[in-house]
Each structure stands twice: as C-alpha cells, then as structure tokens.
Image (spheres, grey):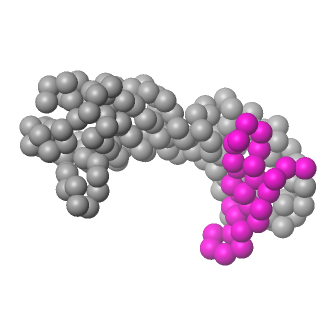
Amino acid sequence: MICVNAVYKTRLNEDINLDKVANLFSNLQSKLYVGRPTQLKIKCSNNIVCLLLSKGAIRIMGKGINLCDATSILFTEILPLFTNARPMLEVQTMTFVGYTGFEVNLKKFANDFNNELQTFYNFEIFSALKINKYKPISVNLFFSGKIVLCGGKCEYQAQRIISLIIYYCCCV
C-alpha cells in the first residue's frame, strides 16, 4: 500500500493579500488564480504544492508527503515570507492505493458481500465496485485487483481497510 496523495490544512487568523504574497515568491513557481475562491498556487520543493486562499486558509499537498514534510515546507518556505504566525497543521485527506495481486470478479464480490460491506456495482456507470461500509472514506475495488481508498486520515486506518478488502477478495 502506498500513499499517492496527502492534503494538510491550516488557517491563519488573518486574510492573506495574495497579490503581495505572489510577488514574494518570484524564486518559486507560483500562479495567482482570480475567481472564486481566489487562491495562490505555489510549487515548493519535492513536488509539493501549497495553496493559499485569501481568507487565510492554507492547503499543502503532494505525493506521499507526511505531516513532518508539510510542516517543514509551511514553516521554512511559505510563512516566513509574510507572517510570524505558527498555525497547527492537520490532515485533511489522504489517498492510498493497494493491490490484491490478482484479478477480482466484481459481480461475484458484490453479490457475496453486499450486506456486509454495503457494496455498489454497476459496470455501465463506473468500472469499479464501490464499498460504502467505511464512509466517509471512499473505497473502490477494480477488476485488476487495485484498491483505491480516498478520504483516509492515517496510514494505519488505510492499511486496516485495504487488508480487510484483500481478505474478502480471497474468499470470492
């Protein structure tokens, strides 16, 4: 199982002047998006992206980053340029991918475990089987054996769910 995307969030107790901040990031790749919501996208080191929103919200996201990476980026590359604030970061969402190692008969899986896992499968609508038992976490199982888990908050939780799905797949 790997984390393919993680998003961390925080909020400043002040609005952010995005035009002013955009000018401070001339050494980094940044782009100001005007609209609703107005946001500044900054490409930081290690392919990590930081979004600053005008009302003070901040999002830091990237492939497989952890809370330490996100905190380091926030406190060394972003905040020192325009504020002395030191807000706490928290996980907003994480996306994980796991594999069964074999193909799965999704129709049989849906029939066998519908009551237990609250499955939904309609190939004409979406090629994956959706497992609703773990809401608000979205779990999709594909014919190839790929398992995609969106909305997780920690790696342990994702590992537990993916392990259970692999166990059920072995029973089909």
Q: Based on the picture, tell me whether residue 49 belongs to the magenta stretch.
A: yes
Determine the image quadrant of residue 46. top right
Near-viewer residue (84 or 36): 36
| Spot occupied by residue 106 in the image (x, y as percentages of width and height) | 19, 42
Is residue 44 found left or right of 165 in the rendered image? right
Which residue occupies 52% across, 38% down? 4
Q: Tell me the quarter of the image containing the C terminus.
A: top left
| Spot occupied by residue 71 in the image (x, y as percentages of width and height) | 70, 35
Near-viewer residue (164 or 74): 164
Which residues are drawn in magenta?
27-54
Q: Residue 91, can we see it? A: no
Near-viewer residue (141 or 88): 141
Determine the image quadrant of residue 113. top left
Q: Residue 149, can we see it? A: yes
Which residue occupies 84% across, 67% down? 19
Q: How many marks?
A: 0
| Spot occupied by residue 171 in the image (x, y as percentages of width and height) | 14, 25
Q: Based on the picture, tell me whether residue 82 belongs to the magenta stretch.
A: no
Q: Tell me the quarter of the image containing the N terminus.
A: top left
Which residue occupies 69% across, 42% down? 48
Which residue occupies 69% across, 48% down? 49
Is residue 47 found left or right of 79 in the rendered image? left
Q: Is residue 161 above or below residue 33?
A: above
